[in-house]
Image (cartoon, helix red, strand yellow):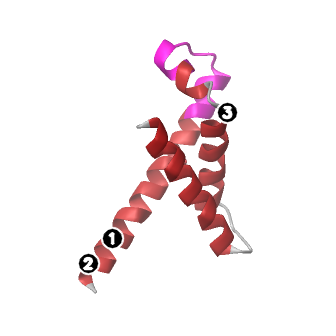
Amino acid sequence: MLQFKEMHSSFSRLSVFYGLIFVVIKGYIELNFVNEGVDLLLANESFCRCMRLFRNATFHYQKQAIPEKAKIIRFLNIIEKLQI
């Protein structure tokens, strides 16, 4: 049971971390910052869309919690493919 609690706690912290990364991305875009590496990553529309969906699934009320978690899994799969 302790291992499950530790995994859940880690997942929760990562969810908040990734959710807040999108806030940083929005600020980066709105403030017109320029960085070759960041701009290359943000050029991937699928990545940005998944970051937004992940943020929404983490911080916004969801009528159907389980389908929203599928968005999280999709996001993590994209992250893994990008090797971030």
Main secondary structure along the magenta-highlighted residues: helix
Question: Does the residue at mark 2 contact the one at mark 3 (Cβ under 8 Å)?
Answer: no
Q: Which residue is mark 2?
A: 3
Secondary element type, mark 3: helix
| Label 2 – label 3 distance at C-alpha | 36 Å
Question: Does the residue at mark 2 contact the one at mark 1 (Cβ under 8 Å)?
Answer: yes
| Label 2 – label 1 distance at C-alpha | 6 Å
Q: Position of residue 72 (x, y in %)?
A: 56, 58
Which quadrant of the figure has residue 1?
bottom left
Please tell me the numbered disc located at residue 45.
Answer: 3
Q: Position of residue 65 (x, y in %)?
A: 65, 73
Q: Is residue 18 magenta?
A: no
Q: Nearer the viewer, residue 51 or 75?
A: 75
Residue in the picture at 44% in, 45% down: 80
Residue in the picture at 47% in, 36% down: 82
Image: magenta residue range: 25-39
- What crowding class fits label 2: few (fewer than 14 Cα within 10 Å), some (14-19), or many (20 or more)? few
Tag 2: residue type? Gln
Question: Does the residue at mark 3 contact the one at mark 1 (Cβ under 8 Å)?
Answer: no
Residue in the picture at 53% in, 45% down: 78
Q: Which residue is mark 1?
A: 7
Q: Is residue 60 left or right of residue 78?
A: right
Tag 3: residue type? Glu
Tag 1: residue type? Met
Q: How many marks?
A: 3
